[in-house]
Amino acid sequence: MSATIIEGKPVADSIYREITNDLITLKAGGCTPHLTVVLVGDDPASQVYVGMKQKACEKYGLGSETILLPGTTTENELLQVVDKLNHRPDVHGILVQLPVPKHISAKKVIDAISPEKDVDGLHPINRGRLAVGDECFIPCTPAGVQQLLLFNNIKTEGKHVVVVGRSSLVGLPFALMMMQKKAGANATVTVCHTGSGDLKPYTKEADILVAAAGRAGIITADMVKPGCVVIDVGTNRVDDPSVPRGYRLTGDVDFENVKNVAGAISPVPGGVGPMTIVMLLKNTVKAARQQSGL
Ligand code: GUN
């Protein structure tokens, strides 16, 4: 039996509809939610992601702006840009695209973003709030994964969720979310990472397996319990001379083989990908609502 395919688009579309409704109220009150994305350097993948964020804002009627800075920008210069954005009342959300060049401390830059405008959910205030279960901005990709599960009626309550990867953008926040005693969570959580050694003894026990390691195809069929729900967060570029752009995107999961074992599985592309951007817009609308009082 082949697994049910968990597509991101229908879920994202339903959230875009909610956003459209929220925008009517905000715009009637004279507030257009505005996202500013800062990109330092010319990393091709980052340019694509930033372009997608900008396009989504335009399509759904949010204000947006991308500040492109050369790779030679100093840490101080970037901190000054962030400071200006913190003080601009027309900017509700700030996102500094990661990774930043090596000579800049990502931590220093993230710490400098006003927590009220931190629509990426990466500021320590938002991270701390997430850890204690308080209201906060949640990082967009794990928030999107939770929405994928909810929309598809996949129960997490009492289930064993195994997360592969402990990154600050995905693995760590998702594990914290799943532990909470809340609807759409309340799971038993295991986090595997590069220090875990053999992953299979852990992944085999998963009712829900979230692959967020950033390594193409590391989750193979023998690592998955029959019927498991597999969510693939990986977006790895793999060389492919047969396509015009010279590479294709592939997940952390060996999709072709795992789909014959799993109960449900999200594809790459088309699974988690569309969720990240819609959750960013949702966070921006939330930031605008909080800042405008509308
Ligand atoms: N780079 C890849 N994903 C993300 C993200 O969600 N936020 C930021 N700021 N940078 C990223």
Image: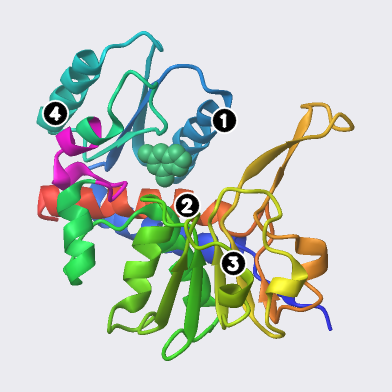
Q: Residues within 10 Å of mark 2 (few under 14, many from 20)?
A: many
- Number of residues whose C-alpha sits closer than 10 Å to that of mark 4, classed few (under 14), some (14–19) or many (20 or more): few
Is 159 left or right of 123, judged from the image as shown? right
Q: To which residue does mark 4 refer? A: 88
Mark sitting earlier along the chain (4/3): 4
Question: Considering only order in the chain, which callout, 1 or 3, is on the residue closer to the N terminus?
Answer: 1
Q: Is residue 129 in view? A: yes
x and y percent of residue 168 in the render? 36, 50
Tell me whether circle 3 and circle 2 mark residues in contact (CB < 8 Å): no
Instruction: Measure the alpha-carbon separation of dots 3 and 1.
Output: 28 Å
Tell me the magenta residue range: 109-122
Nearer the viewer's eye, disc 3 or disc 1? 3
Q: Which residue is mark 1?
A: 45
Nearest to N terminus: mark 2 or mark 4? 4
What residue appears at the point 21 percent right and 40 percent down from the top-left corner? 92
Identify residue type, mark 1.
Ala
**Observer-nearest residue: 277 or 43?**
43
Kind of element beneath mark 4: loop
Q: Between tags 4 and 1, which lies in front?
A: 1
- Furthest toward the right, the residue is 242
Q: Could you tell me residue 23's position as x and y percent?
A: 31, 52
Residue 199's label in the rendered image is: 3
The x, y position of residue 165, in whole percent, is: 48, 57
Residue 61 shows up from this direction = no
Q: Is residue 111 magenta?
A: yes
- Label 4 and label 1: CA atoms lie apart by 28 Å
Q: Who's the residue at 23% across and 30% down the image?
A: 109
Amino acid bearing label 4? Arg
Q: Which residue is mark 2?
A: 276
Q: Label 2's element?
A: helix
Q: Earlier in the sequence, mark 2 or mark 1?
A: 1
